[in-house]
Image (tube, rainbow, N blue to C red):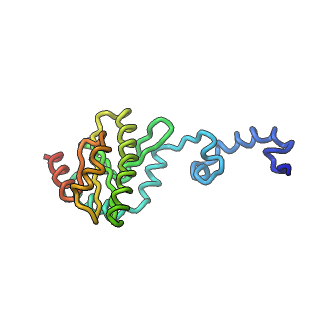
Amino acid sequence: MRCTCAAHSGERSKIPALLGKMRKIKPLWCLLSPFAYSFEFRLSSKWMSKVHALVPLTEQEEEVEGILLQHAISHLTHAVFPIRNRMYVVDFFLPNQRVAVECWRSTSRRGVALTWVEKNAAYVNLKFRRIKETNPDVRWIALVEVMRAESELVREYVGPIMEHADFMAYEMNQLAEILRGLVI
């Protein structure tokens, strides 16, 4: 059976002109486009920052923000780091201390939770590494909480993976101590 779409018919010559017009369309369209991953679209970090500012904080992020406010630490939530052709979003960036905070939590059963936080730690470590390549002065804090496992067990799973984190916390009070040390 032969395809009858414009891309595979005699109208193929119209495609470059159409693509030229598509590059002028605003970034929101790019996110919804079937071509979004086929062509290079440059989204501004200012635009991405505005979009991520609208994303509500998770319960854990609200607790972290409470600690930051308690210690009067100025911070940006969901800060965007443009790196090459990607944009990485971190949960918090403390501009005066040049520190980024990334946090994640699992309330699942112990085995499922440990597997999930281990996989997420690999991604977060990759994010830390890539951002450090262009911003070597930024220090990193990772907060990992598993509600149904002991923090020592979480440390065994996540600790070895997080080689690019400057500070690791496995409970909220550990994060508070690290932040208190940065302010003093």
Along the line of sight, which residue is nearer the eye, 81 or 75? Answer: 81
Res 95 seen here: no
Snapshot quadrant of residue 23: top right
Residue 12 coordinates in the image, percent (x, y): 81, 40
Residue found at x 26% / y 50%: 156
Residue furthest out toward the front: 111
Residue found at x 27% / y 47%: 159
Residue 3 coordinates in the image, percent (x, y): 83, 50
Task: Please state the total of marks drawn on the protein image.
Answer: 0
**134 relative position to 85: left or right:** left
**147 relative position to 184: left or right:** right
Res 51 seen here: yes
**164 relative position to 51: left or right:** left
Snapshot quadrant of residue 182: top left
Residue 90 coordinates in the image, percent (x, y): 37, 49
Give the vertical position of 164 relative to 26 (above or below).
above
Residue found at x 50% / y 43%: 44
Along the line of sight, which residue is nearer the eye, 69 or 63? Answer: 63
**181 relative position to 41: left or right:** left
Give the vertical position of 146 relative to 73 (above or below).
below
Residue 53 coordinates in the image, percent (x, y): 41, 56
